[in-house]
Amino acid sequence: MRKSDGGLIPSIVHCTAVPLWIFFLSLFFFFQMLSAQTEPSAFAQEATFEKSVVQLSIVQQEYDYTTPWKKSAMSRGIGSGFIIEGNRILTNAHNVSNARYLEVKKQNLAKRYPAGVQFVGHDCDLAIVTVFDLDFYKDMVPLEFGPLPQVNSKVQTCGFPLGGRTVSVTEGVVSRIEVGIYSHTQADSHLLVQTDAAINPGNSGGPVLQNGKVVGVAFQGLQSADNIGYMIPTPVIDHFLEDIKDGRYDGFGSLGVFTFEGLHNPAYAQYLNLQEGTEGVVVMGTILNSSVESILSRNDVLTKIGDFDIDNDGMIRIYGLVLDMSEAVEQKQIGQMIDLVFYRDGQKHTASVKVDYNEPVLTFRKEFDLPPRYRCFAGLTFVTVNRNYLETWGRNSISDIPFYLRYIFYDVQSLNTDPQRKEYVVLSEILSDTLTTYATGFIQQAVENVNGLPIMNLEDLDEAFGKDVDGFWIIKFLGNDTPMILDAQQARLRHPEILKTHEVPFTPLPEHKL
Amino acid sequence: MKKQILLTQLIFALLLSLSCARSRSVQTSGELSATFDKSLVYINASIDQYDGFQPWKRSPSADSVCYGTAVGPCQILTIAEPLANASLVQIKIHSSGQFIPAAIKVIDYDLNLCLLEISADSISTPLQTVIFTEEFKKGTELQGRWLSSDAAVKTSRGFLDRAMVLPSPTSYQRTLSFVVSNVSRQTSRGELYTSDGQAIGIAYSSSEQDVFLIPGEKILQFLKQANHKEYIGYGTTGFNYFEFLDPTVRKYLKMPEDMKDGCLVSSVYSKGTGSESLKFNDVLLEIDGYPINAFGRYQHPLYGEISFEHLLQRHVVGEPINFVVWRDGKRLELSAKSQRFESSEMLVPYQQYDKQPEYMVLGGYVFQKLTRNYLRLWGDNWSGKVPPHLLHYYRDLSLKSDEKRKDIVILSFVLPSEINLGYQNLGRIVVKTFNGMETNKISDLIKAQNLFPDSPFHVIEFEQEYPTLVIPKEKLSQTNQAIAELYGIQKTENIY
């Protein structure tokens, strides 16, 4: 089974379950400098590298997702980027995510230029960085973009492996073009180009060139194999650059439909009253509140998306390649329409559908840059359930996390049938106090309701904790019959003291309502 | 001076005589222990269990060794766990190296005890019977004894430390155990433990420092029932509980401030003692007149404070039992009858020994009944690895099944063939309906095949977002036969 328009859910589940062999490590491509005997164009390119490729130094700091008012330890990193038109530097999002300080350096020059992140697309691992001092751009040459490279064609990758003062250039061959996981968020899938370039730690965000034009941005390698590196190709870069033209990054959209390659089975096709020879994929379900929820139904057969016929494997012919049908949606920006052809009970239907985020209430992607939302009432610390929180259990998080959180993570699509739900909320921590001496057993459980009010998002807690039930706070958790019961009056009295003791930024309790 | 020598000689003689007396005493204890040697039995079993994923075939045979104690002229007591799925049981007795065939007379996995029987003709003299005692003397030195395969008696030592109610390796129940501390060897296969000529219990588990015994009390209960015409068995706990220390929750339940005792009923099972009378959030105050404290323990005259579960498990099924609870702000007396919750009655059976798993192969699709044995096939830390939807049924609903749904039926995996093209990666998913009929028991798979005889397909729906499974009926029986031959399946269904 697959999710046709992004493949997020099954992919990330398997990715987490078998982390070693599909754990992508973001690294820099590293090649030997081309010698003077190579193709004549190399001379011109070498000159361009010097005036186009830059080194980024970043100080990064993540948030603590269990006690979210704290931040984790700092780390320093080095990445690459390159100048594009408009005095901008294109690089990878993972180079600048959670950045607290950023500076840019040119090849063979000592001067450092403080810089800022102008746009970041975590879902496609691309970012635009700008240097505050405009003199920086005076002698720099912006690179132009080329088309999607051909398989088996040569490409040159530029960057700063392990730092260094000069740009390193290596040559490789395009081995494969397919839709695959982008490791930065561990959840998003887009078109990517595989090369046989040697991969070394140190540099992402450098340009991959062909005939002097950028055909990709180097961004990740496969740790478990030799000579498998990946670049972000120009269709994805174009989408990003087009998206930010209005001054805001919206991201990639999807349809919100789950499909199954069931038409390989003639009995299934016959059961669905399809004419012999009809190719396509069968709709299994739609995401709650998605664009297609009111259009597609279970056992509909999708046969065409946009201008592309869908085969029984869910693939379309695009860019001269056979790629996942999600690639048709990838060409669209959020809010644009895409046409669908589908069969229901043997009858042909057409529909025009808006491309939107269409995500389940528990998103599987990692979050960056935004401080985690939380509430801390009388030491009860609530955060939203997301990948960042679940990864606090460490590398084996998927088998070690408490059962119900794992259940939600895997099966949110079938567990949540309430269109009002925006997210799941978890009691991440109970700050020690006499108030909660006997209540510690409820930690790390997902909240179902508080004082009788269902908790559909974090903000619902504000209203719920303004109430009580006969003088008690009653907190009910998913998959647990026994509620947590606290003396509401005592909790209100203890709230300021608990926050002070544990150095939590003070926020008043919701106003008590009868 | 003479007087001094005489006094010294007198003291020396006194010390010598005391020393001899002590020596005789030790010898007596050893002799007493040695009297059990003729009752010790070596047991070897051939274990033939079915393959969990391919339940039509057996896994390779394995040998299992355990140790027994004669409890009748032709009867041997041992623990149940090593004899689960045994196809052949043989014993050796102290006087002979020859194997003697034995039959399982009664096996109770809740008590983890097994009674074997041998033919009177197979031995020249009756076995020397051991009678177990219910005594418990904390701190007593115990001797462990067992007959090894080469007919030698092996021993170990330790000290009887405490009585506890502990999880059983073969049941969802927690049962009474004796803990033997500072042991000289780890023993866990039915070895007999004695003290001063009395049989105290048999070993069933061990840790680095401790050996855990099934005590004489449980053994005597078992033997009393085992020699009845029909083995009825003892009650099992029909509810779960939490220790109840939180004064806020006591206040919420309107309990008087001076009422500090009683544990909290956190869930009630569909069967078992107390399941018909207790309710969620009852505070359990007394059982059969014994006050229950906030930790769920009562004062036993011999064992000291011990879990109330021990009180429930003393009763034969059907015997009356009395509870006092705090419910709805009032003290309430309740009468109930002892009940036994058999593993086979659970929505997801806790254990399934000595039986071939239930399954059906249709069109290459392998349907199975979900059991804990199946979930355990995921290996170490299985609960963190199995699909959570399957674990949910075991964890949250297994002991609280409703009247309607008796089994969870799953599509385990698919044996690839042309008929199931496109569906071959499906597996580990729960069947919802078969030809429109809800699948509440695995036998419904057979009944549902007779529905809609004019339809060219069998149509199966699954829980969650999985595809509709369509199986063409045309030539299905021939296809089934071909698949069975191809994959070496002797029997395409086993449904009780």
Image: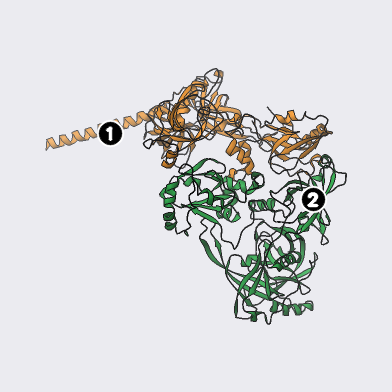
Report the front residue among B406 and B307: B406
Extreme residue in the front direction: A514
User: Can residue B380 be seen at all in this image of the molecule?
Assistant: no
Q: How many marks?
A: 2
Report the front residue among A94 and A67: A67
For the C terminus of chain B, the image quarter is top right
Query: In the rendered structure, the residue with mark 2 lies on which chain?
Result: A
For the N terminus of chain B, the image quarter is top left
- The x and y percentages for residue A322 are 81, 57
Residue at image coords 52%, 62%: A71
Q: Residues within 10 Å of mark 2 (few under 14, many from 20)?
A: some
Q: Are marks 2 and 1 on the same chain?
A: no
Tag 1 residue: B19
Tag 2 residue: A313
Query: In the rendered structure, the residue with mark 1 lies on which chain?
Result: B
Chain (orange): B
User: Can residue A363 be seen at all in this image of the molecule?
Assistant: yes
- The x and y percentages for residue A58 are 59, 70
- The x and y percentages for residue A407 are 61, 45
Q: Is residue B229 left or right of residue B262?
A: right
Q: Residues within 10 Å of mark 1 (few under 14, many from 20)?
A: few
Q: Is residue A205 above or below residue A181?
A: below
- The x and y percentages for residue A149 are 79, 67
Chain A representation colour: green
Labels 2 and 1 touching (C-beta < 8 A): no
Q: Quadrant of residue B101?
A: top right
Residue at image coords 21%, 35%: B12
Q: Quadrant of residue A102?
A: bottom right
